[in-house]
Amino acid sequence: MAKEGEHSTFHAKDYVDPPPAPLFDASELKKWSFYRALIAEFIATLLFLYITVLTVIGYKSQADTSTDSCAGVGILGIAWAFGGMIFVLVYCTAGISGGHINPAVTFGLLLARKVSLVRAIAYMVAQSLGAICGVGLVKAFQSSYYNRYGGGANTLADGYSSGTGLGAEIIGTFVLVYTVFSATDPKRKARDSHVPVLAPLPIGFTVFMVHLATIPITGTGINPARSIGAAVIFNNDKAWDDHWIFWVGPMVGAAIAAFYHQFILRAGAVKALGSFRSQTHV
């Protein structure tokens, strides 16, 4: 206990939470940085779909023409392709656009007031268009194999119900978006100097792990841009039959992750309630 006459020293928190982004900020439309971020999201998602879907098509063609059961990269290699590309692209674009490369991530950050509604909608459009163009390049380069091996489209595997597929997408996206919030938390950045440098690593590794778990169920979406890009270019009835799962699941998972991190782990609900109570007693 402090002696009489001595005052305990109050230490202010060693980090600063950025102010909430405005819900609608039309001024962003006048800034070059906004359009630069859109270009970054478009190109990053294009490259992401190009490399990953090309890996999927290449693996299926090798496995189909070879008698070796271990031919090609296998599911493990496909998971590494997705996780590795996310690691690389988040690292490259984080300082420009935030490195979302996923409408579900953007949606989660919108709910947490990390981005404005204008930016969120523009990001989602850029990501979806980038994904479509990326898969279009795959079809152009692998035209002989593209349609034969499913075009890299996400579909619900035989033997699984829509509810199971939806649940897998919700949980998988929850893990991803929860990791994004944790890896970019300003509280951790202030106390662990290595966090800003390594933030893309846990995000990419999470994508890898989720793919290992859910490829057998849905082919792993957890990214609506990835799913719609492949569906638009492949344009097969099977690709569209359960396509809603790859939008509803990731968006629900992202919303749950945003709520969990902001209001449970960061005690946003408790702080808001405490602020309300203090105002009522003024």
Image (tube, rainbow, N blue to C red):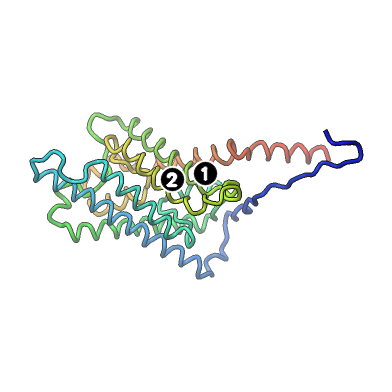
Q: Which mark is residue 80?
A: none
Relative to 122, residue 103 above or below: above
Can you give x and y, in whole percent of width and height, for residue 47 in the image? 32, 59
**How many numbered tags mark residues here?**
2
Relative to 142, residue 240 above or below: above
User: Is 13 placed left or right of 174 in the picture?
Assistant: right
Query: Which quadrant does the C terminus fall into?
Result: top right
User: Is 140 placed left or right of 195 in the picture?
Assistant: left
Q: Nearer the viewer, mark 2 or mark 1?
A: 2
**Residue type highlighted by circle 1:** Ser
Q: Earlier in the sequence, mark 2 or mark 1?
A: 1
**Residue type highlighted by circle 2:** Pro
The quarter holding residue 274 reads: top right
Report the front residue among 55 and 205. 205
Residue beneath disc 2? 202
Residue beneath disc 1? 182
Q: Residue at x 46, y 67 (%)?
A: 36
Q: Secondary structure at mark 1?
A: helix
Q: Residue at x 69, y 47 (%)?
A: 13
Report the front residue among 81 and 39. 81
Can you give x and y, in whole percent of width and height, for residue 127 in the image? 39, 56
Q: Residue at x 36, y 34 (%)?
A: 168
User: Is 3 placed left or right of 206 in the picture?
Assistant: right
Disc 2 and disc 1 in contact, CB within 8 angstroms: yes
